[in-house]
Image (spheres, helix red, strand yellow):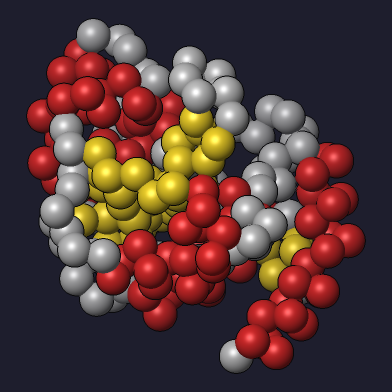
Amino acid sequence: MDLSIAILSGGQSRRMGKDKALLDVGGEPLLGRVLRRVAPLSDDLLLIAPARPGYEQFAARRVDDLVPQAGPLGGIYTALTTAQHPYCLVLACDLPFVNVQLLRYMISLPRDYDVLIPALRGTSAQGGEETLQTLHAIYSRACIPAIEQQLAQGRYQVIGFFPRVHVRRIPESTVRQFDPELLSFFNANTPEAYAWALAHVQAFDAAERLQG
């Protein structure tokens, strides 16, 4: 337990039409499900979110965004600035199938990086031939100066500061050893995605119990 874990839940859930963090998934709020699954991995759980109704139920240290309206990049900056440990795993709040074994693998790797991030194949809106899972990644405090400079410039794309730090990619082939269907990165952020999650969560949990 030498790294912090931060869950980002500061968005407006516009595509969902309601606060997705509080949606019921398998008998618990979606955000509560994510927190419960990652709680054994760290002694410092942070919730980067405003003081919204219903959030007082979650067993995590809530922190307001230090740079409002800066999107996920601002959330990552807040997490790194307020975390107790020099490395911080940052996750989105809408990941119902977050894979604990994959996270344990990521945490176990030598800390010879500033960013440790899964890289999935295929073109993306990020402008390359891969999709970097920026809200399923481990960041070091060494990233703070580069993030501060980018925030000062009003640029909020998370990968914008990556050229200034040491980024270690986890290739898709390695990710699939732990998560063959890549469900770790499934975002329940639309009504359709939420319905899909509800239809599959019981089977997912049952299979996970069988695996031990």
Please state which of residues 175 and 203 is positioned toward the viewer in this rendering: 175
Q: Residue at x 42, y 33 (%)?
A: 72
The tally of labels here is 0
Q: Residue at x 30, y 10 (%)?
A: 154
Quadrant (top left, top right, bottom left, bottom right) of the N terminus: bottom left
Quadrant (top left, top right, bottom left, bottom right) of the C terminus: bottom right
Q: Position of residue 193 (x, y in %)?
A: 79, 44
Q: For this view, does 96 lie left or right of residue 11?
A: right
Residue 158: quarter of image: top left
Question: Where is 21 relative to 35, above or below?
Answer: above
Residue extending furthest toward the top: 153
Residue 189: quarter of image: top right
Residue 81: quarter of image: top left
Question: Where is 152 relative to 121, above or below?
Answer: above
Q: For this view, does 29 lie left or right of residue 200?
A: left
Please state which of residues 189 and 64 is positioned toward the viewer in this rendering: 189
Q: For this view, does 133 lie left or right of residue 182?
A: left
Q: Does residue 203 appear in the picture of this structure? A: yes
Please state which of residues 26 and 173 is positioned toward the viewer in this rendering: 173
Q: Position of residue 68 (x, y in %)?
A: 36, 26
Q: Position of residue 119 (x, y in %)?
A: 45, 41
Q: Residue at x 57, y 23 (%)?
A: 123
Q: For this view, does 17 lie left or right of residue 109?
A: right
Question: Where is 121 relative to 30, above or below?
Answer: above
Q: Does residue 59 appear in the picture of this structure? A: no
Q: Position of residue 50 (x, y in %)?
A: 45, 42
Q: Residue at x 69, y 28 (%)?
A: 14
Question: Where is 10 relative to 105, above or below?
Answer: above
